[in-house]
Amino acid sequence: MMILFKECSLYAPKFLGTKDILIGGLSILAIADQITPPTGVDVQVIDCSGLKVIPGLIDAHVHIAGAGGEGGPATRTPELQLSHMISAGVTTVIGCLGTDGMTRNVESVLMKAKSLKQEGVSAWILTGAYQVPTPTILGDVGKDVAMIDEVIGVGEIAISDHRSSFPTAHELIRLTEHARVGGMLGGKAGIVNIHMGDARNPFKPIYEAVEMSELKFTQFWPTHVNRNDYIFEDAKEYGKKGYIDITASSYPYFPEYEIKPSKAIVEFIKAGVPLEHITLTSDACGSLPDFDEKGNLVKLEMGHPRSVFDEIVDAVRDEKLELEKAIQVSTSNVADILKLHKKGRIAVGKDADLVFINEDFEIVHCAAMGKLLMKDSIILKKGSYEK
Ligand code: ZN
């Protein structure tokens, strides 16, 4: 069965005008000004006049198997649900473990990624957790990256945070070098996703690791760079050399400390950070704890995947960033950094992951891996145990 989307305003992410798009199997088969439905096969034709189509979003930092627990066992967060991805226009997730590398494990993140793939979306994972030495499946981060299909890197490794194991520069170099070689052997990015905490001079451990080794800044991918005003200022400089990831879901809970993600994107561009270096992820299903001066937990919230799409819309509406630029932070930029060659762009031969939005920036249809999972704003496919 094929699907022909007629007359969509195509943002690939670059705006390419009004086009017809034919998808079949898992892939985009054709894009042209006019496509007539092929004969002899089942083709569903959907009129998309008035709709914009963007690549399915890649949410590259999600605690898919649950996380948290900093407030005791009752504060452990639940697993990601399929419908929460689809209704957020997210067709690819990258799962990670997080703070709790002690009572949770990478194996469960891997199995959750496999389950999401069976349910119809795309998923990869990062091996490891906050702590160094970091938990793995095969005993070494390099082996995990090289030999397990779903593992594309390591993370989130915590630095500059009271929950971090404060890895030395040598420890960070060794771990990153293993990830890099594992990536080369497995044909993957082998990137090291770094959880950035609230300590002053937060990028210092990465600068030291790069100075003391042959590693490049682009082997690291620090996240939460909008968590307070001083990391945000430092990230404006760091981002000229390496990648920086903005976290979307925590802002509504901590507006007194954090920089609004939509604003952060535009401020980074203004500061001279190349747009290709900027990514936006949700941190969904992660716990969002707030600690007082004495280190006591005062409140705990949970992130949601929808935050990425909402911040992209705010970047367009409130910050006046062109849509084709705004969507890059969660589509082509992420695909390039993570070497996901079939993701992040609408082009012939790429995976058929498409999100259709109307004039009011509401998600109308969503297709993942060639199948319609949402049509006319109604979710057609739910996760295995979702009602
Ligand atoms: Zn984190």
Image: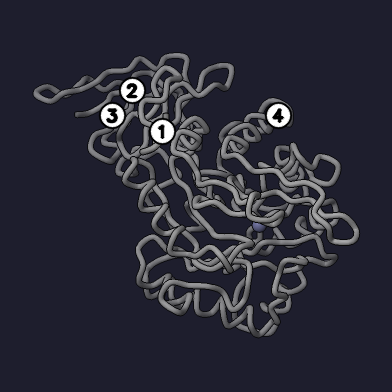
Residue at (51% x, 18% y) in the render: 358
The quadrant where residue 44 appears: top left
For residue 5, the mark is 2
Q: Are marks 4 and 3 in contact (CB under 8 Å)?
A: no
Question: Helix or strand or loop: what does disc 3 sit on?
Answer: strand
Q: In which quarter of the image is the N terminus?
A: top left
- Report, in whole angstroms, how far the alpha carbon at label 4 lies from the one at label 3: 31 Å
List x then y, in percent, for residue 286.
62, 50
Q: Do the residues labelled 1 and 3 touch (CB within 8 Å)?
A: no
Work out whether residue 272 or residue 48 is closer to the camera in this orientation and state it. Answer: 48
Left or right: 301 as drawn, with respect to 35: right
Q: Do the residues labelled 1 and 4 touch (CB within 8 Å)?
A: no
What amino acid type is highlighted by mark number 3?
Leu
Q: Do the residues labelled 1 and 2 touch (CB within 8 Å)?
A: yes
- Residue under numbered circle 1: 354
List x then y, in percent, for residue 209.
68, 79
